[in-house]
């Protein structure tokens, strides 16, 4: 699960740095579907599975905001340097 969180975090930062909200919405849906399928259909409504999906989605959202912030700071530094 730790590797999954790290992967989702890096993906979120890259999405925030390069692309905007529509890609975040699609990626959130992909994470929910992949997490549900990986857990198995029988355990879809298990509290542990639902909390895991929620943790992945919150990690993606927070990493996206961090990526947007880093992108704005980087672009601002590039324009002031020219």
Image (cartoon, rainbow, N blue to C red):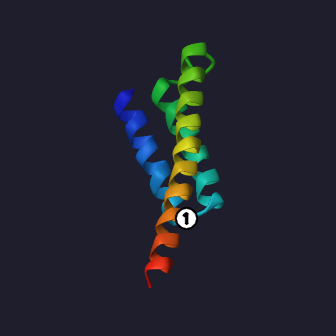
Left or right: 26, with 18 as reference point: right
Estimate the x, y position of residue 9 in percent, counting from the top left. Answer: 45, 42
Residue 10 located left or right of residue 61: left
Q: Residue at x 50, y 38 (%)?
A: 34
Farthest residue in the top direction? 47
Decide which of 5, 78 is in the foreground and name it. 78
Residue 54: x and y in percent read 60, 29
How many numbered discs? 1
Residue positioned most to the bottom: 82
Closer-to-camera residue (7/75):
75
Which residue is more in the foreground, 14 or 78? 78
Q: Is residue 16 above or below residue 43?
A: below
Q: Which residue is mark 1?
A: 72
Query: Where 17 falls versus 77 (above or below)?
Result: above
Q: Quadrant of the N terminus?
A: top left
Q: Residue at x 46, y 66 (%)?
A: 74
Q: Relative to 79, say whether 70 is above or below.
A: above
Residue at the image position 53 percent from the left and 24 percent from the top: 52
Taking 2 as reference, is 71 left or right?
right
Q: Residue at x 63, y 18 (%)?
A: 45
Residue 38: give x, y in percent of width and height. Answer: 46, 30
Quarter holding the C terminus?
A: bottom left
Q: Secondary structure at mark 1?
A: helix
């Amino acid at each position: 699960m730790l590797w999954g969180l790290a992967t989702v975090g890096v993906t979120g930062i890259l999405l925030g740095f390069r692309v905007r909200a529509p890609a975040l919405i699609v990626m959130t849906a992909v994470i929910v579907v992949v997490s549900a399928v990986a857990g198995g259909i029988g355990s879809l409504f298990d509290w542990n599975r639902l909390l895991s999906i929620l943790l992945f989605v919150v990690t993606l959202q927070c990493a996206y905001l961090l990526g947007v912030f880093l992108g704005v700071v980087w672009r601002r530094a590039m324009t002031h340097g020219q």
